[in-house]
Image (cartoon, rainbow, N blue to C red):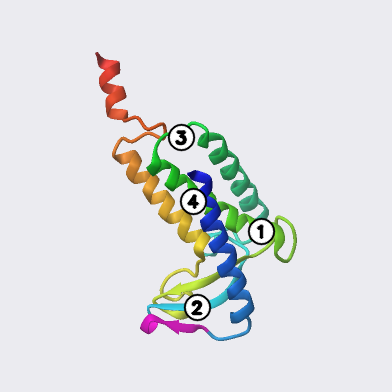
Amino acid sequence: MVFVVAAVLWGIDLLTKQIAVSTLEGKPPVEFLGGLVYFQLVRNPGAAFSMATGLTWVLALVAIAVVVAIVWLSRRLRSVGWAIGLGLVLAGALGNLTDRIFRAPGPLQGHVVDMISAFAPNGQGWAIFNVADSAICVGGVLIVILSLLGKDYDGSSTKDKKKAASE
């Protein structure tokens, strides 16, 4: 299930980035939903909120490490919730890594295509982001919730493990 979730969201991310590049290049922000959302093309050499702008290659290596870790962990997953959460994070990592590898100015230095600006144009209301960024955030929140609820990736409950260990 991890790979199905990842493949679907990765595909959606790549498609929306291609649409953004082909329709928003050189154009002003497009208002949508009464100004709740604006679509505009931004090429981001950094991470969220334009952090680590000069460290694109480091961000690419971190994304590679995340992909490897999730693929390795996926063999032991027995929880649907964890599979969905990790699939979302994997999709986001692959989506932004694809940009960093294949987009200008070159391999491991490519700029990530962002196109969604919430509440105001030009990132004035919130950072400009893409589907991959959203997948990472939603997947991360789901993983935190599962952890707080005591649900392990192997399908067991940490509460049950603690109870069994104390007996």
Q: Which residue is mark 2?
A: 39
Q: Amino acid at mark 4?
A: Val
Q: Which residue is mark 4?
A: 5
Q: Which residues are magenta?
A: 29-35
Query: Is 69 placed above or below 37 here?
Result: above
Instruction: Tell me the number on the disc at residue 100.
Output: 1
In the image, what residue occupies the spot 30% across and 40% down? Answer: 148
Marks 2 and 4, how far apart in space?
25 Å
Query: Is 30 placed above or below 134 here?
Result: below
| Comes first in the chain, label 4 or label 3 | 4
**Residue 95: quarter of image:** bottom right
Q: Which residue is mark 3?
A: 77
Point out residue 146 in the picture as x, y percentages from the top left corner.
Answer: 34, 42
Q: Amino acid at mark 1?
A: Arg
Which of the two discs, 3 and 2, sits closer to the camera?
A: 3
Query: Is 166 placed above or below 58 here?
Result: above
- Circle 2 packing at 10 Å, graded few (<14), some (14-19), many (20+), is many
Point out residue 80 in the picture as x, y percentages from the top left corner.
Answer: 39, 41
Q: Secondary structure at mark 3?
A: loop
| Comes first in the chain, label 1 or label 4 | 4
| Comes first in the chain, label 1 or label 3 | 3
Marks 4 and 3, how far apart in space?
14 Å
Point out residue 79 in the picture as x, y percentages from the top left corner.
Answer: 39, 37
